[in-house]
Image (cartoon, coloured by chain):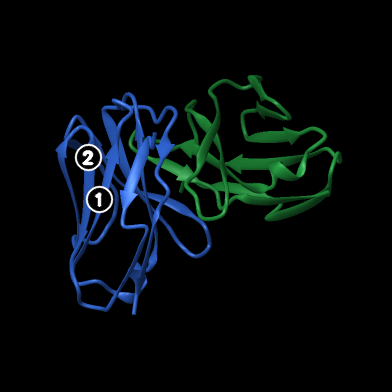
Amino acid sequence: EDQVTQSPEALRLQEGESSSLNCSYTVSGLRGLFWYRQDPGKGPEFLFTLYSAGEEKEKERLKATLTKKESFLHITAPKPEDSATYLCAREGSSASKIIFGSGTRLSIRP
Amino acid sequence: DTAVSQTPKYLVTQMGNDKSIKCEQNLGHDTMYWYKQDSKKFLKIMFSYNNKELIINETVPNRFSPKSPDKAHLNLHINSLELGDSAVYFCASSQGSGNFYEQYFGPGTRLTVT
């Protein structure tokens, strides 16, 4: 069964302390890998799409990378406004499925 | 300008009732989705419509019926509500189907069934 697992479940960092969030998956086949940000009480906001192993994309303090088995969301020198839940999703083995992980709740202390 | 809007934002109702949630997008997208986010924060896709045609229908009780009157609207009607239906329901839209591309989500509708 296709699965997407995110770790850690929660991460608390000091402002400026860089770290990485992990998204691992068992979905076979070369399909899209997505990262979203979700603030409390709001809908997810699109960040990145990755399709190929080795691909990297950046946006401000965030960089997403992709291997054949996992993706990382690297956050460099985070600020309190980066606090949110970060969701990873993978297109399933059939084109009609998308599978989300349960997210990493990131908290940045000033 | 709101890109994807949902009404109502909160919905509290009793078991056995029938309710509807409305969704509208003004982005000109041709594909719209309904997701359910449970208490553990897992987002699960329920339905997807492309140009008013149902293209994804995941394993969802047939008490849930989506309706797309036009490309900009996708409504969700739920019959005989049960306690387990309590969740946050998100509408989303994107341009293109077959791949999920970049999706724009609405603010969500928190449904509480008592």
Q: Amino acid at mark 1?
A: Lys
In the displayed structure, B93 sits above or below B83; it is above
Q: Colour of chain A?
A: green
The structure residue drawn at horizontal position 64% and vertical position 21%, both measured from the top left corner, is A57
Look at the numbered disc 2 and give the secondary structure of its residue. strand
Q: Amino acid at mark 2?
A: His
Q: Secondary structure at mark 1?
A: strand
Tell me residue A52's x, y (percent).
57, 20
Q: Which chain is blue?
A: B
In the figure, is residue A95 to the left or right of A8? left
Label for residue B22?
1
The spot of residue A56 in percent (x, y) is 66, 21
Q: Name the quadrant containing residue B4.
A: top left
- Left or right of B18? Residue A97 is right
| Chain name for mark 2 | B
Q: Residue at x 19, y 60 (%)?
A: B62
Q: Position of residue A21 (x, y in %)?
A: 71, 42
Q: Nearer the viewer, residue B39 or A65?
A: B39
On the image, numbered disc 2 is attached to which residue? B73
Q: Are both tags, 2 and 1, on one chain?
A: yes
Residue drawn at x 40%, y 52% is B108
Circles 2 and 1: CB atoms closer than 8 Å: yes
Query: Which residue is located at x 20 percent, y 74 percent?
Result: B17
Chain bearing mark 1: B
